[in-house]
């Protein structure tokens, strides 16, 4: 992705979800962005929203606050399971994560 595309993506509303089938439970994401990611009692990571409730349905998303975007993007890059997906809310196109162009 080019710098221009990254800048454009950063100004749009984004949401994030985790594919728990691939999560290794190492907790890297929860270290990078504990406001957005949390390990549950099952040992897997889930996203959570401003209400602090975990989104536990498969593919369920939480909003990415702009102030936490870099931490969320770093989580997606470092995720050993390659299972953190960040996408645009408007067209659901993945902008960071294993399916991003
Ligand atoms: S970084 Fe990836 S593999 Fe590790 S706990 Fe978070 S979602 Fe799971």
Image (cartoon, grey):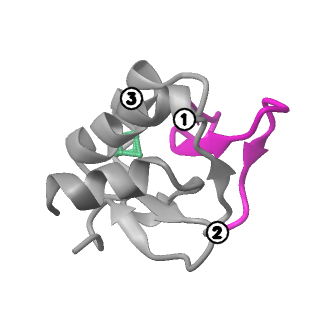
Element class at badge 1? helix
Identify the residue at horizontal 65%, vertical 58% (top origin): 61
Q: Please say whether residue 75 is one of the residues in the magenta stretch.
A: no
Q: Mark 3 points at which residue?
A: 71
Q: Which of marks 1 and 2 is in front?
A: 1
Please state which of residues 83 and 22 is positioned toward the viewer in this rendering. 83
**Quadrant of the picture in which ligand 1 is shown:** top left
Q: Name the residue under label 1.
A: 66
Q: Dots 2 and 3: beta carbons under 8 Å?
A: no
The local crowd at label 3, few if under 14, some if 14 to 19, many if 20 or more residues have their Cα within 10 Å, is many
* Magenta segment boundaries in residue numbering: 38-58
Label 1, label 2: how many angstroms apart (C-alpha)? 24 Å
Identify whether 66 is placed above or below 86.
above
Q: Name the residue under label 2.
A: 58
Q: Please provide percent x and percent y for residue 23.
A: 39, 52
Q: In which quarter of the image is the N terminus?
A: bottom left
| First reached walking from the N terminus: tag 1 or tag 3 | 1
Element class at badge 2? loop
Q: Which label was assigned to residue 76?
A: none
The local crowd at label 2, few if under 14, some if 14 to 19, many if 20 or more residues have their Cα within 10 Å, is few
Check mark 1 vs ligand 1: CB closer than 8 Å? yes or no.
no
The overriding secondary structure of the stretch rendered in magenta is loop
Q: Nearer the viewer, mark 1 or mark 3?
A: 1
């Amino acid at each position: 992705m080019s710098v221009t595309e990254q800048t454009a993506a950063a100004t749009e509303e984004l949401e994030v979800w985790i594919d728990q089938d691939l999560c290794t439970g190492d907790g890297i994401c929860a270290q990078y962005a504990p406001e957005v990611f949390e390990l549950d009692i099952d040992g897997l990571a889930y996203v959570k929203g401003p209400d602090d409730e975990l989104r536990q349905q498969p593919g369920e998303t939480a909003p990415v606050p702009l102030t936490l975007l870099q931490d969320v993007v770093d989580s997606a890059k470092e995720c050993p399971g390659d299972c953190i997906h960040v996408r645009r809310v408007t067209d659901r196109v993945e902008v960071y994560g294993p399916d991003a162009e």
